[in-house]
């Protein structure tokens, strides 16, 4: 992230798409990866994250149960 800080929002949005993956491992890893990114970037980089979109994606996954079983 230090070399490409402008990629943060794109990585998060891509991982929100993986919440719907047919592969259990991908569905399970996507929210953890987003959490890792958000917790470990500089405050300045966090400003570029669209929190409304992030929260909406996580809430949608939660409403669907984020089932790890297909």
Image: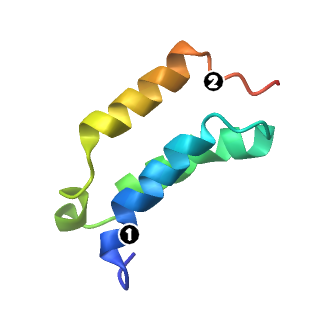
Q: Residue placed at 64% from the left, 34% from the top?
A: 20
Q: Which mark is residue 46?
A: none
Return the mark for residue 66: 2
In this view, 20 is above or below 59: below
Name the spot of residue 15 as percent of width and height, x first. 53, 49
Q: Position of residue 58 (x, y in %)?
A: 45, 30
Local SS, label 1: helix
Name the residue that disc number 1 marks. Answer: 7
Q: Do the CB atoms of the residues marked 1 and 2 lie less than 8 Å apart? A: no
Q: Give the mark nearest the N terminus, 1 or 2.
A: 1
Quadrant in which the C terminus is drawn: top right
Q: Nearer the viewer, residue 5 or 10?
A: 10
Does 59 sit left or right of 17 as displayed?
Answer: left
Where, quadrant-wise, is the N terminus in this rendering?
A: bottom left
Q: Nearer the viewer, mark 1 or mark 2?
A: 1
Can residue 45 be seen in this snapshot? Answer: yes
Task: Give x and y (percent) for residue 37.
Answer: 43, 58
Q: Nearer the viewer, residue 40 or 67?
A: 67
Residue at 59% of width from left, 16% of height from top? 64
- Per the model, the C-alpha gap separating discs 1 and 2 is 25 Å
Query: Few, some or many C-alpha atoms within 10 Å of disc 1 (few <14, some 14-19, many ≥20)?
Result: few
Residue that protrudes farthest toward the bottom in the picture: 3
The residue carrying pointer 2 sits among few (fewer than 14), some (14 to 19) or many (20 or more) residues within 10 Å by Cα, namely some
**Residue 66 at x, y = what percent?**
63, 24
46 and 11: which one is in front? 11
**Where 52 sits versus 60, above or below?**
below
Q: Left or right of 6: which side holds 44?
A: left
């Amino acid at each position: 992230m230090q070399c490409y800080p402008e990629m943060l929002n794109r990585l998060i949005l891509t991982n929100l798409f993986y919440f719907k993956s047919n592969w259990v491992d991908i569905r399970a890893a996507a929210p953890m990866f987003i959490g890792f990114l958000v917790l470990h970037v500089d405050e300045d980089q966090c400003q570029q994250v669209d929190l409304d979109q992030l929260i909406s994606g996580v809430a949608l996954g939660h409403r669907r149960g984020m089932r790890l079983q297909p």
